[in-house]
Image (spheres, helix red, strand yellow):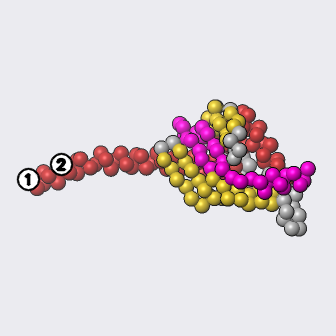
Amino acid sequence: MKRLDIFVIILLFLPFKTFCQMESQTLKMKTKIFLDFVDAINTSDVDKLYSLMTNDHIFIDSHDNKATGRDNLKQAWIGYFAMFPDYKIEINQMIEKDSLVCAFGYASGTYKNLKTADNSNYWRVPAAWTAIINDNLVKQWQVYVDNIIVMDIVKRNQ
């Protein structure tokens, strides 16, 4: 009888464990896609970014402005990398829930790579990002950052 009880318990928990492993693998895949997107940003690889976006990709900036469509966003990224060729995202922490991946860290860059002795065109600010991952592609990318420093640098150089 005790052997049967143990066998039943094993059978009951085996599917749950398998489900949890599958769920964990799915979550890891979403984090990987997010990190691939960040890597494409950090290397200014517009073609890789394009390949990771859904056709109806949505970008939302820190002022809640929205741009849609991966063709439009490809051009937007080309423009942004022209403005900040060394733009980088540093991630310190990530959270994942269902199709949502969130990251926290810093964004940095140098305006048009205009290096100065006092480094006045360089900025590094705390930031957060969220992405909605659907079918192994980034459907939505949103950034949360106080970019007043960045805007001041841009204005000063115009």
Range of magenta residues: 129-158
* Residue type at the position of mark 2: Val
- The dot on residue 148 is none
Q: Secondary structure at mark 1?
A: loop
Q: Residue at image x 78%, y 46%? A: 80
Q: Whole-Å distance between the Cαs marked 1 and 2?
A: 11 Å
Q: What is the crowding at mark 1: few (fewer than 14 residues within 10 Å), some, or many (at least 20)?
A: few
Q: Residue at image x 51%, y 42%? A: 99
Q: Is residue 51 visible?
A: no
Query: Camera-side residue: 42 or 67?
Result: 67
Q: What is the crowding at mark 2: few (fewer than 14 residues within 10 Å), some, or many (at least 20)?
A: few
* Residue type at the position of mark 1: Met
Instruction: Decide if residue 82 is on the left or right side of residue 62.
Output: right
Mark closest to the chain's N terminus, 1 or 2 = 1
Instruction: Quickly name the residue at label 2.
Output: 8
Q: Position of residue 33 (x, y in %)?
A: 57, 46
